[in-house]
Every structure is written in structure tokens, then in C-alpha cells.
Image: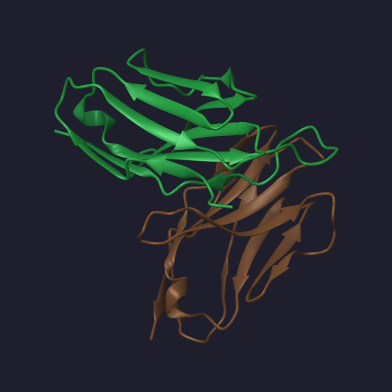
Chain colours: A green, B brown
Amino acid sequence: DAGVIQSPRHEVTEMGQEVTLRCKPISGHDYLFWYRQTMMRGLELLIYFNNNVPIDDSGMPEDRFSAKMPNASFSTLKIQPSEPRDSAVYFCASSRLAGDLFFTDTQYFGPGTRLTVL
Amino acid sequence: AQTVTQSQPEMSVQEAETVTLSCTYDTSESDYYLFWYKQPPSRQMILVIRQEAYKQQNATENRFSVNFQKAAKSFSLKISDSQLGDAAMYFCARGATNKLIFGTGTLLAVQP
């Protein structure tokens, strides 16, 4: 398997511009997670999906952030308009249910997108 | 609050030696998973090892092993025969329903 795929790997944009980050989860995984990592706040869960449906978006910082999962193999995280404080590494991860247990098994992470907003 | 605590912000080990990274957590659940992830300078989050809380046997993956003490809510990572490529940030994480709760990380330096 190719693992979780994210694009672009690096994005540099100017304040006010729209940014779209993309993710392809591992085939067969029905959970998808978006994280943000900064030095100040560490790793933060932004939102996660189950079977393409958003389950918990309580970590989304504000209305400028939105995420979609139109099908099982693709998700986007959009920031509009972007601000310098959005500069971070954004990770996508995927997982599946842990057998007979009612929670998810190991999350596998993509390589991340390093976003710089000038 | 359900937290994961890594009390060692930085650690250093000599090549070929053994190092132990500590992790404690808080939970009221009886079944859960625990993980150690490695993040090298490339920023990729790499799974190192996974422990199922309902299994008493400590997980082992080659040079990496854990000491899981469920009653004490402790989950330490032992790296044996340390190699230069082990230098990275190491994150402990607990699976909480469908989320991961991460510690703040331990930066491991490996001295040649």
C-alpha cells in the first residue's frame, strides 16, 4: 500500500489567499483525521470523519477552516482567508475500527503539508 | 481531563547504549490502545510500537520494547542498541474512543 498521501508537501502563500490541502487515505480505512502541528500548541486534532461523514469538528479553530470528504478516497482541508498564524504542518491520518472493539486502531499518518502564510 | 504526560523534554544516549523514555496517562476506560510515534527531522510521523491495554504482555518490535504498567498508567519505551537513526522526537499517545491524545514529546539525541 502507498500509505496516506498528502499534497502539496509545501505551500507558501500570502495572507488573505485561499489554501486547499489534500489527502488520500489508505484504502480500506474508514476513519480520516486532520491534525495541525505547531511549536506552541503541539499536535492538535482539527476534525475527523467516519465513512465520509464529519464526526467531530470541535478542534477546527474558526470558520475560516473547513473540511470535506466527498468520497472514501479523498479529503480536503481549506483555509479561506489564510492568516500568518495558520502557518504550521498539517497532517492527515487514517485508520479503521479495531476488530470487535468500539474504537479505532492505529492511525497512519501522511507526510504532512508545511504551510507558510506570509 | 484525560492527559498524556511525557516528563522528559530531552534525552541523550550514546550509540549502542539503551535508553528509556517515560510516559504516563490518565484514563477511566478499561480497554484502549497505547502508541509510541517517532518524528524525525523529515516531520513524518512514524509508528514505532503499539500496546493493547487488555493484553498483559509487553509489546516488542526489534530493538524497541515497552514496559506497560496498567495499574500505574505508565507506558515507557525502551530503545536498545541505539543507532544514529533513532535520533528524533518521540510522542506517546493514547487511543481515546476514536481520537489520539498525544503527549508533548521527548527529543532524543544519539551521540556517536
Residue at 35% over, 23% down: A78
Which image quadrant is residue A88 in?
top left
Residue B32, percent across and down? 75, 42
Q: Name the residue located 48 percent from the left edge and 80 percent from the top edge.
A: B83
x then y, percent, for residue B96 = 67, 36
Above or below, A79 relative to B18:
above
Vertical placement of A53 versus B54: above or below? above
* Callout count: 0
Q: Quadrant of the C terminus of chain A?
A: top left
Q: Is residue B73 left or right of residue A70?
A: right
A34 up-or-down from B38: above or below? above
Picture residue at 69% right of the left edge, 65% below the top: B66
Q: Is residue A77 left or right of residue A50?
A: left
Image location of residue A77, percent across then percent down: 40, 26
How far across and how far down the image is residue A75, in percent? 48, 28
Residue in front for this viewpoint, A40 or B65: B65
Quarter where residue A94 is shown: top right
Position of residue A94 in the picture relative to residue A19 (left or right): right
Task: Compare residues A67 and B66 and report the one nearer the observer.
Answer: A67
